[in-house]
Amino acid sequence: MIVKKLPLLLAFVLAVFTVGLSAQRNVTPAIERDPLMEADAKHNLDVAWQSFQLKKAYKGVLSRFEETYAAYPEFSKIDEFLYLAGMSSYYLSDNKGKQKVDLKLEKEKDKFTPERLRENAVAYLSKLVEKYPDSKYKEEAAKTIELIKAAK
């Protein structure tokens, strides 16, 4: 009786292992992240959040973002940084925050015009929406993009 069911048992075992192996083959490898770069980027993100929330120092946020993004664009929380950079650019374009823009200064003349800040805000927030659809900042980013575009 067992001998008659042996081919059926073998077929079942083979099917189970085949499904298991094919599922393993489709696993996408995780991005390897440099622990030191992650720690440094995390520190910059924490400082940026403090600057954003407590100090309303939006130019400082942008500086931290630019530094981190240039050095480590694969940061695991880059969506948060894109959100902070986008919102900081948006707020600065409306002259909000404690750090005021001085367009008389040579280094701020091109970088901080309201038009340029709004363009940057849309660029940062659009990148967040497109590349990080599961981000908790996606909805607010999309709403802010619509606000900016509607104001044109």
Image (cartoon, rainbow, N blue to C red):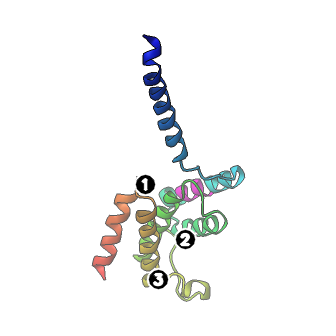
The residue at which mark 1 appears reads as: 135
Visible residue check, residue 97? no
Q: Residue furthest top?
A: 1
Mark 3 and mark 2 in contact (Cβ < 8 Å)? no
Mark 1 and mark 3 in contact (Cβ < 8 Å)? no
Amino acid type of the residue that numbered disc 2 sits on in the rendered structure: Lys
Q: Position of residue 35 (x, y in %)?
A: 69, 49
The residue at which mark 3 appears reads as: 116
Amino acid type of the residue that numbered disc 1 sits on in the rendered structure: Ser
Instruction: Answer whether residue 49 is magenta in the image.
Output: yes
Closest to the camera, between mark 3 and mark 1, is 1
Q: Residue at x 45, y 74 (%)?
A: 123
Query: Which class describes the residues within 10 Å of circle 1: few (<14), some (14-19), or many (20+)?
Result: some
Question: Which type of secondary structure does the marked residue at label 1 adopt?
Answer: loop
The residue at which mark 2 appears reads as: 59
Residue nearest the observer in this picture, 116 or 95: 116
Residue nearest the observer in this picture, 124 or 30: 30
Gap in angstroms between the C-alphas marked 1 and 2: 24 Å
Closest to the camera, between mark 2 and mark 3, is 3
Residue nearest the observer in this picture, 149 or 33: 33
